[in-house]
Image (cartoon, rainbow, N blue to C red):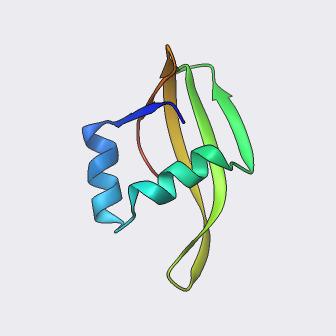
Amino acid sequence: MEEMTFSKHALRKIEERKLSEDIVKKVLNEPKFIFYDLLTNAIVAIANVKIGAISTYLVVPYTKEDEKIKVITVL
């Protein structure tokens, strides 16, 4: 996988939601849906993940430049 960085906002959301960076990487590696946001030029990956006993969709908007991924936030 390409080099990956996280915005301060993304890191705060990961911490608030008690997620791991690995689960974010899973969404990026195995998305169920991928959209392109024309307004922000961001790619939006969505995948079904299991967090503890809960199965939910995780939304990860990110940008990609020169094989580098920057995660904007995690929803």
Task: Name above or below for residue 20 compared with residue 59.
Answer: below
Q: Is residue 57 left or right of residue 16?
A: right
How far from the left and from the top, in percent, is residue 72?
Answer: 41, 36
Task: Name above or below for residue 23 compared with residue 40.
Answer: below
How far from the left and from the top, in percent, is residue 35?
Answer: 69, 34
How far from the left and from the top, in percent, is residue 55?
Answer: 62, 75
Q: Residue at x 52, y 45 (%)?
A: 60
Q: Residue at x 50, y 30 (%)?
A: 2
Task: Name above or below for residue 48 compared with residue 67.
Answer: below
Which residue is the extreme one toward the bottom? Answer: 53
Which quarter of the picture shows residue 39?
top right
Which quarter of the picture shows residue 20?
bottom left
How far from the left and from the top, in percent, is residue 61?
Answer: 52, 38
Q: Residue at x 40, y 54 (%)?
A: 21
* Closest to the observer, 55 or 23: 23
Which residue is the extreme one toward the front? Answer: 1
